[in-house]
Image (cartoon, rainbow, N blue to C red):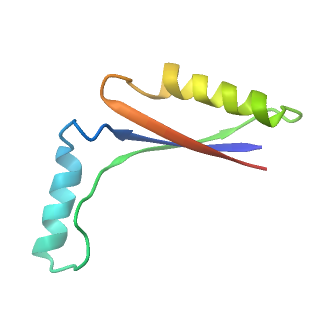
Amino acid sequence: MKAHVYVTLKRTVLDAQGKTVADALRRMEYKGVDDVRQGKYFLLTLASGLETAAAESEVERIAREVLTNPVIEDFNFHLEN
């Protein structure tokens, strides 16, 4: 089983890199993009035999305690068999 974990800055935190990319897209005349938020992506390969509920709990714990700074970042994830 694999866990796809996405970490982004909270909406209340200025995303300077995302703003720079959004500004560049506008200058390059790309249409249809209102906002850009940058982030991090982690792919975790989980131990075989791990039950789905246990995997969800463990991935959430890892994301909260290791992969993110909870003061400025949010995360979401999904599992893939």
Choose between 24 and 64: the one closer to the eye.
64
Seen at 31% across and 37% down, the residue is 10
Q: Position of residue 33 (x, y in %)?
A: 25, 70
Left or right placement of residue 58 versus residue 22 in this view: right
Above or below residue 80? Residue 14 is above
Q: Is residue 29 left or right of residue 46?
A: left
Direction from residue 79 to residue 37 in the image, left or right: left
Q: Residue furthest left?
A: 27
Residue appearing at x 22%, y 36% in the figure? 12
Q: With respect to residue 28, does 35 lie above or below?
A: above
Which residue sits at x=26%, y=76%?
32
List x then y, in percent, for residue 60.
59, 29
Residue 9 in which image quadrant = top left
Residue at horizontal 63 percent and vertical 30 percent from the top: 59
From the viewer's perspective, is residue 61 above or below residue 48?
above
59 relative to 65, above or below: below
Q: Nearer the viewer, residue 55 or 42?
A: 55
Query: Looking at the image, which residue sits at the far right?
Result: 49
Which x, y percent locates residue 73?
36, 32
Quadrant location of the N terminus in the rendered image: top right
Residue 16 sits in quarter:
top left
Horizontal and vertical percent position of residue 79: 69, 45
The foreground one among 71 and 19 is 71
- Determine whether, in the image, residue 25 is placed left or right of residue 3: left
